[in-house]
Amino acid sequence: MAGKIKSMSQVKQLLLLYKDGRGRKEIARSLKMSKNTVKTYLAKLQSLNLNIEDLLVLEDPVLEARFHAGNPAYKDNERYDSLKTDLDYYKKELNRTGVTRKLLWEEYKLANVNGYSYAQFCFHMSQQEIASRRSMVMNHKPGEKLYIDFAGKKMSYVDKSCGEIVQCPVFVACLPYSDYCFAMAVRNQSIEEFLFALKCCLEFLGGVPQIIVSDNLKAAVIKASNYEPDINRAMEDFCNHYQTAAVPTRVRKPKDKALVENQVNLVYTRVFAKLRNVTFFDLEQMNKAILEKNLCHNQTRMQIKPYCREEKFLSDEKPLLMPLPEESYEIKYYRQYKVMANNHILLYPDKHYYSVPYQYIAQQAKVIFTRTLVRIFVRGQLVAIHQRDFTPGKYTTVKEHLCSFHNHYLSRSPEYYRQKAKEKSEMLFSIVDKLFSGGRPPEQNYKSCDGLFSLHKKTDPVIFDRACEIALECGYSSYRYLLTTIENLKKSPKTVVNETPRSLPSHNNIRGKEYYSQTIINF
């Protein structure tokens, strides 16, 4: 019986023929067995001390256990009983530095002189380790979970600008119910790239599962724990945006998401291997090729089941996914700054200034910013929203956030001063218009205009208008000239006349231009 075990149906035929009184040779010839095999089975029958009728009614597995029970001697003696109590101890000791099975066996032999040999000792330790590897079949509900992970190996592309080979991690996700897979290469495993890949995954699925299951990678978990891991704030914001929950696995327990671990191996075979001879020159080109191979993978018929992953996903799982939000997710960053005296806050990552209403000067403001927006909160209220600007050292200012003086200062322009002067006086308008028509940059005239308005406010209108007339007749429009003229007019009030000036009386003492053009003077 050292060869291949005979089927129990043949053994029952052997027993029936032996019961009928057939000889060994005849039984062997009828069943096409060797005579020694027949002899061995009959000898075993005698040692069992059982009736043939009792053996024939047994089920095949039970009957096989009677004839081929093995040799349990290694468990039926005192040696095994003394060893099995220490197997857990030996297993723990193997995890310590420098401890080997050989060393443990030597210690075992010192305490048990008649103990097992080294080969048997190792065999029992291996059996103990195999028996401790327990596994459970998980029943998954459609649309409930999404398993995510990063593949251990990376893909690469060649940077055309310098010829450098850039290694890229590959993000892998799968829905455990349908085993529907998603794969995408990213630049690194940072929080930004991880959440971007996860966002692309949900858009690829066309819906959101109830739970996202990840391992304890740093992009998702602050502090690992078997019971209450701390999820980082960016991951929490992501889950809140998509109305889902994040549940990391236990530390060093890959079986908690065994299906995505298996998907990683399938991605190695059906994506990595098929693209091994293709040279990529940017990340977008590589992801396009990965998407094509991943689609083929999802459409490949499974070995045991009569459908592919995509068919199962579309028919049973996709209708049960939660809808995607209208707005795409953008990662949020949080800062806290004090509003400066110029009613702006400085966003340090960009070195850019953003305005806040002047009422909140010197107060603490909480800033939440994304790649496109900057939102500023004071005392729990949203007080300002700005488009994010990455230009360092510049100001983004909303006019309504400024006080009246600052608002006036920023609203200055030639037209502003012309309009304001026209409302006050026609003569003042003429002076201001001549001032801006003089060819100087407008900014250089703003203070002069403020001075002119101040003079108009302090001076008698008659004197002011007369001073403007004199200035225009002389071709001047500066503040200093008008100020001097007004002071002179105030000193000689009789010169301020509103009447029409009289012409000189007629007389004969007029030489004319001919007199001055002659070369010889005639008296």
Image: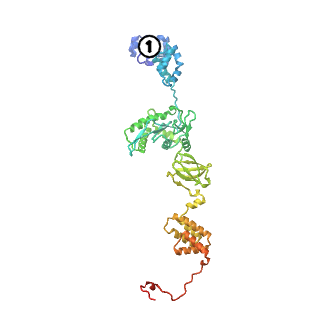
Q: Residue drawn at (49%, 66%), measured in percent from left and top? A: 440
The colour scheme applied to this rendered structure is rainbow
Q: Residue drawn at (58%, 35%), measured in percent from left and top? A: 228
Residue with the mark numbered 1: 41
The number of callouts visible is: 1
Q: Position of residue 130 (x, y in %)?
A: 49, 24
Q: Nearer the viewer, residue 316 or 118?
A: 118
Q: Nearer the viewer, residue 2 or 106?
A: 106
Describe residue 113's horizontal placement relative to residue 456 as left or right: left
* Residue 25 visible, this angle: yes
Quadrant in which the N terminus appears: top left
Q: Position of residue 113 (x, y in %)?
A: 49, 13
Q: Secondary structure at mark 1?
A: helix
Q: Position of residue 512 (x, y in %)?
A: 47, 85
Q: Nearer the viewer, residue 203 or 307?
A: 203
**Crowding at label 1, few (<14), some or many (≥20) Cα neighbours within 10 Å?**
some
Q: Position of residue 466 (x, y in %)?
A: 58, 75
* Residue 60 visible, this angle: no
Q: Nearer the viewer, residue 360 or 489?
A: 489
Describe residue 482's horizontal placement relative to residue 64 as left or right: right
Residue 240 occupies quadrant = top right
Q: Is residue 441 above or below residue 94?
A: below
Q: Is residue 363 above or below residue 264?
A: below
**Identity, as a three-letter code, of the amino acid under mark 1:** Tyr
Q: Residue furthest left?
A: 277
Q: Is residue 482 above or below residue 399?
A: below
